[in-house]
Amino acid sequence: MSTRKASLKDKETNNGTSRYVLERCASVNECFDISFKVMLLGDSAVGKTCVLVRFKDGAFLGGNFIATVGIDFRNKVVTVDNVKVKLQIWDTAGQERFRSVTHAYYRDAQALLLLYDITSKSSFDNIRAWLTEIHEYAQKDVVIMLLGNKSDMVAERVIKREEGEKLAKEYGVPFMETSAKTGVNVELAFLAVAKDLKHRAAKQPNEPKFQIHDYIESQKQKSGCCGGYM
Protein backbone atom coordinates (compact mmCIF):
# COMPACT_ATOMS: atom_id res chain seq x y z
CA MET A 1 0.00 0.00 0.00
CA SER A 2 2.73 2.46 0.93
CA THR A 3 4.71 1.58 -2.21
CA ARG A 4 1.67 2.25 -4.36
CA LYS A 5 1.07 5.62 -2.71
CA ALA A 6 4.69 6.61 -3.20
CA SER A 7 4.58 5.56 -6.83
CA LEU A 8 1.43 7.58 -7.44
CA LYS A 9 2.92 10.60 -5.73
CA ASP A 10 6.05 10.38 -7.88
CA LYS A 11 3.93 10.10 -11.01
CA GLU A 12 1.96 13.19 -10.03
CA THR A 13 5.15 15.10 -9.29
CA ASN A 14 6.80 14.12 -12.55
CA ASN A 15 3.75 14.68 -14.69
CA GLY A 16 3.26 18.45 -14.77
CA THR A 17 -0.16 18.29 -16.38
CA SER A 18 -1.48 15.80 -13.87
CA ARG A 19 -0.26 17.85 -10.94
CA TYR A 20 -1.62 21.04 -12.52
CA VAL A 21 -5.06 19.48 -12.75
CA LEU A 22 -4.97 17.98 -9.26
CA GLU A 23 -4.02 21.28 -7.67
CA ARG A 24 -7.07 22.85 -9.28
CA CYS A 25 -9.64 20.20 -8.43
CA ALA A 26 -11.46 20.43 -5.13
CA SER A 27 -13.90 17.93 -6.64
CA VAL A 28 -14.65 16.51 -10.07
CA ASN A 29 -16.89 19.50 -10.78
CA GLU A 30 -14.31 22.05 -9.64
CA CYS A 31 -11.55 21.36 -12.20
CA PHE A 32 -10.50 24.36 -14.25
CA ASP A 33 -7.84 25.50 -16.68
CA ILE A 34 -7.81 29.22 -16.00
CA SER A 35 -9.24 31.50 -13.33
CA PHE A 36 -10.51 35.08 -13.27
CA LYS A 37 -11.76 37.43 -10.58
CA VAL A 38 -15.10 39.14 -11.23
CA MET A 39 -16.72 41.76 -8.99
CA LEU A 40 -20.35 42.80 -8.67
CA LEU A 41 -20.74 46.52 -7.97
CA GLY A 42 -23.61 48.93 -7.49
CA ASP A 43 -25.79 50.55 -4.87
CA SER A 44 -27.29 48.60 -2.01
CA ALA A 45 -30.45 46.62 -2.89
CA VAL A 46 -29.95 46.62 -6.68
CA GLY A 47 -29.86 42.81 -6.56
CA LYS A 48 -26.16 41.93 -6.71
CA THR A 49 -26.46 38.98 -4.33
CA CYS A 50 -29.61 37.74 -6.08
CA VAL A 51 -27.87 37.86 -9.46
CA LEU A 52 -24.94 35.90 -8.06
CA VAL A 53 -27.17 33.25 -6.47
CA ARG A 54 -29.17 32.93 -9.71
CA PHE A 55 -25.99 32.36 -11.70
CA LYS A 56 -24.29 30.10 -9.15
CA ASP A 57 -27.24 27.99 -8.00
CA GLY A 58 -30.00 28.70 -10.53
CA ALA A 59 -32.27 29.91 -7.74
CA PHE A 60 -33.98 33.15 -6.78
CA LEU A 61 -33.18 34.56 -3.37
CA GLY A 62 -36.64 35.92 -2.69
CA GLY A 63 -38.05 37.39 0.50
CA ASN A 64 -36.06 39.13 3.19
CA PHE A 65 -32.38 38.36 3.63
CA ILE A 66 -29.42 39.97 5.31
CA ALA A 67 -27.64 42.51 3.12
CA THR A 68 -24.04 41.80 2.21
CA VAL A 69 -21.64 43.17 4.81
CA GLY A 70 -18.29 44.20 3.33
CA ILE A 71 -17.55 41.54 0.72
CA ASP A 72 -18.25 37.88 -0.01
CA PHE A 73 -17.44 35.54 -2.89
CA ARG A 74 -18.43 32.32 -4.62
CA ASN A 75 -16.82 30.24 -7.34
CA LYS A 76 -18.32 28.77 -10.48
CA VAL A 77 -16.61 26.89 -13.31
CA VAL A 78 -17.99 27.42 -16.82
CA THR A 79 -16.89 25.99 -20.17
CA VAL A 80 -15.76 28.48 -22.81
CA ASP A 81 -14.59 27.05 -26.15
CA ASN A 82 -13.77 23.72 -24.45
CA VAL A 83 -11.75 25.51 -21.78
CA LYS A 84 -12.76 25.25 -18.12
CA VAL A 85 -12.91 28.81 -16.79
CA LYS A 86 -13.25 29.39 -13.08
CA LEU A 87 -14.97 32.63 -12.15
CA GLN A 88 -14.26 33.81 -8.63
CA ILE A 89 -17.19 36.18 -8.16
CA TRP A 90 -16.98 38.80 -5.44
CA ASP A 91 -20.23 40.23 -4.13
CA THR A 92 -19.73 43.67 -2.60
CA ALA A 93 -21.80 45.76 -0.20
CA GLY A 94 -23.22 48.88 -1.82
CA GLN A 95 -23.38 51.03 1.29
CA GLU A 96 -21.04 54.01 1.42
CA ARG A 97 -19.48 52.90 4.71
CA PHE A 98 -18.06 49.77 3.05
CA ARG A 99 -16.54 51.51 0.03
CA SER A 100 -13.03 51.71 1.51
CA VAL A 101 -13.14 47.93 1.95
CA THR A 102 -14.25 47.17 -1.60
CA HIS A 103 -11.76 49.62 -3.14
CA ALA A 104 -8.94 47.32 -2.05
CA TYR A 105 -10.36 44.52 -4.20
CA TYR A 106 -10.66 46.53 -7.41
CA ARG A 107 -7.06 46.36 -8.56
CA ASP A 108 -6.76 42.62 -9.13
CA ALA A 109 -10.24 42.14 -10.60
CA GLN A 110 -10.30 41.27 -14.30
CA ALA A 111 -14.01 42.08 -14.76
CA LEU A 112 -16.62 44.27 -13.10
CA LEU A 113 -20.37 43.88 -13.45
CA LEU A 114 -21.98 47.20 -12.49
CA LEU A 115 -25.66 46.98 -11.58
CA TYR A 116 -28.50 49.42 -11.14
CA ASP A 117 -32.16 48.77 -10.34
CA ILE A 118 -34.57 49.75 -13.14
CA THR A 119 -37.12 50.69 -10.45
CA SER A 120 -34.70 53.02 -8.63
CA LYS A 121 -33.68 56.32 -10.20
CA SER A 122 -31.03 56.97 -7.54
CA SER A 123 -29.25 53.68 -8.29
CA PHE A 124 -29.10 54.66 -11.96
CA ASP A 125 -28.00 58.22 -11.22
CA ASN A 126 -25.15 56.84 -9.10
CA ILE A 127 -23.72 54.77 -11.97
CA ARG A 128 -21.49 57.66 -13.06
CA ALA A 129 -20.00 57.86 -9.55
CA TRP A 130 -19.36 54.12 -9.61
CA LEU A 131 -17.65 54.40 -12.99
CA THR A 132 -15.47 57.22 -11.64
CA GLU A 133 -14.38 54.93 -8.78
CA ILE A 134 -13.73 52.10 -11.22
CA HIS A 135 -11.49 54.26 -13.38
CA GLU A 136 -9.65 55.41 -10.27
CA TYR A 137 -9.08 52.08 -8.55
CA ALA A 138 -9.40 49.29 -11.15
CA GLN A 139 -6.99 48.06 -13.81
CA LYS A 140 -7.05 50.12 -17.00
CA ASP A 141 -7.98 47.11 -19.14
CA VAL A 142 -10.65 45.73 -16.80
CA VAL A 143 -13.76 44.35 -18.51
CA ILE A 144 -16.82 46.39 -17.50
CA MET A 145 -20.44 45.48 -18.15
CA LEU A 146 -23.49 47.55 -17.17
CA LEU A 147 -26.58 45.65 -16.05
CA GLY A 148 -30.05 47.07 -15.47
CA ASN A 149 -31.46 44.56 -12.98
CA LYS A 150 -35.05 43.65 -11.99
CA SER A 151 -36.34 43.78 -15.56
CA ASP A 152 -39.26 41.59 -14.48
CA MET A 153 -40.71 44.50 -12.45
CA VAL A 154 -42.40 46.12 -15.44
CA ALA A 155 -45.03 48.06 -13.50
CA GLU A 156 -42.43 49.66 -11.20
CA ARG A 157 -39.97 50.59 -13.94
CA VAL A 158 -38.67 54.17 -13.81
CA ILE A 159 -35.52 53.79 -15.95
CA LYS A 160 -36.16 53.05 -19.62
CA ARG A 161 -33.97 50.50 -21.33
CA GLU A 162 -32.92 53.18 -23.82
CA GLU A 163 -31.47 55.22 -20.94
CA GLY A 164 -29.27 52.33 -19.91
CA GLU A 165 -28.20 51.77 -23.51
CA LYS A 166 -27.33 55.45 -23.91
CA LEU A 167 -25.23 55.55 -20.75
CA ALA A 168 -23.42 52.33 -21.67
CA LYS A 169 -22.67 53.66 -25.15
CA GLU A 170 -21.30 56.88 -23.63
CA TYR A 171 -18.77 54.87 -21.61
CA GLY A 172 -18.15 52.27 -24.30
CA VAL A 173 -19.29 49.27 -22.26
CA PRO A 174 -21.73 46.45 -23.09
CA PHE A 175 -25.21 46.62 -21.59
CA MET A 176 -28.03 44.22 -20.79
CA GLU A 177 -31.10 44.21 -18.64
CA THR A 178 -31.29 41.25 -16.29
CA SER A 179 -33.70 39.64 -13.87
CA ALA A 180 -32.45 37.56 -10.97
CA LYS A 181 -36.05 36.43 -10.45
CA THR A 182 -36.67 35.02 -13.94
CA GLY A 183 -33.01 34.45 -14.84
CA VAL A 184 -33.22 36.57 -18.02
CA ASN A 185 -29.71 37.37 -19.31
CA VAL A 186 -27.99 36.52 -16.00
CA GLU A 187 -26.04 33.55 -17.31
CA LEU A 188 -25.31 35.31 -20.59
CA ALA A 189 -23.80 38.28 -18.75
CA PHE A 190 -21.30 36.07 -16.91
CA LEU A 191 -20.56 33.87 -19.93
CA ALA A 192 -19.92 36.89 -22.15
CA VAL A 193 -17.45 38.24 -19.60
CA ALA A 194 -15.80 34.81 -19.22
CA LYS A 195 -15.46 34.49 -23.00
CA ASP A 196 -13.90 37.96 -23.26
CA LEU A 197 -11.42 37.22 -20.46
CA LYS A 198 -10.53 33.82 -21.91
CA HIS A 199 -9.86 35.34 -25.34
CA ARG A 200 -7.66 38.03 -23.79
CA ALA A 201 -5.61 35.44 -21.92
CA ALA A 202 -5.13 33.17 -24.95
CA LYS A 203 -4.97 35.79 -27.70
CA GLN A 204 -2.34 35.28 -30.37
CA PRO A 205 -0.44 38.34 -31.78
CA ASN A 206 -2.35 38.49 -35.08
CA GLU A 207 -5.69 37.27 -33.75
CA PRO A 208 -8.53 39.82 -33.90
CA LYS A 209 -9.87 41.20 -30.63
CA PHE A 210 -12.93 39.50 -29.20
CA GLN A 211 -15.99 41.72 -29.68
CA ILE A 212 -18.23 41.23 -26.66
CA HIS A 213 -21.03 43.35 -28.18
CA ASP A 214 -21.15 41.11 -31.26
CA TYR A 215 -21.13 37.97 -29.12
CA ILE A 216 -24.07 39.20 -27.04
CA GLU A 217 -26.00 40.10 -30.19
CA SER A 218 -25.34 36.67 -31.72
CA GLN A 219 -26.61 34.94 -28.59
CA LYS A 220 -29.73 37.12 -28.66
CA GLN A 221 -30.44 35.99 -32.21
CA LYS A 222 -29.90 32.34 -31.30
CA SER A 223 -32.28 32.50 -28.35
CA GLY A 224 -34.82 34.68 -30.14
CA CYS A 225 -35.09 36.74 -26.98
CA CYS A 226 -35.26 40.51 -26.76
CA GLY A 227 -34.21 40.83 -23.10
CA GLY A 228 -32.44 44.17 -23.13
CA TYR A 229 -29.39 43.75 -25.27
CA MET A 230 -27.27 46.49 -26.69
Image (spheres, rainbow, N blue to C red):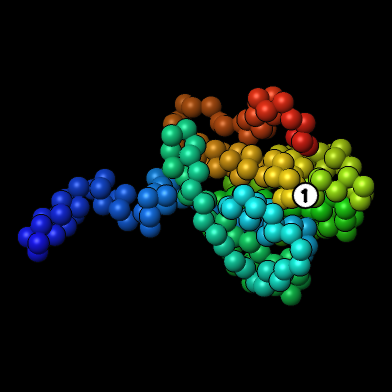
Residue 71 at x, y percent in the picture: 62, 68
* For residue 183, side relative to residue 198 (left or right): right
In the rendered image, is residue 200 in sight?
Answer: no
Residue 216 at x, y percent in the picture: 66, 32
Task: Name the residue type under label 1.
Answer: Asn
Q: Nearer the viewer, residue 11 or 141?
A: 11
Residue 53 at x, y percent in the picture: 63, 56
Q: Nearer the viewer, residue 150 or 124?
A: 150
- Quadrant where the N terminus lies? bottom left
Q: Residue at x 68, y 69 (%)?
A: 68
- Quadrant where the C terminus lies? top right
The answer to whether residue 224 is above or below residue 49 is above
* For residue 5, side relative to residue 160 (left or right): left
Q: Residue at x 39, y 45 (%)?
A: 33
The answer to whether residue 112 is above or below residue 214 is below
* For residue 17, side relative to residue 110 (left or right): left
Residue 56 at x, y percent in the picture: 58, 52
Q: Residue furthest bottom?
A: 97
Q: Which residue has dot 1 on it? A: 149
Dividing the picture into quadrants, the one containing residue 145 is top right
**How many tags in the picture?**
1
Q: Residue at x 81, y 45 (%)?
A: 151
Q: Residue furthest left?
A: 3
Mark 1 residue element: strand
In the rendered image, is residue 101 in sight?
Answer: yes
- Number of other residues with Cα within 10 Å of mark 1, as a class: few under 14, some 14 to 19, many 20 or more: many
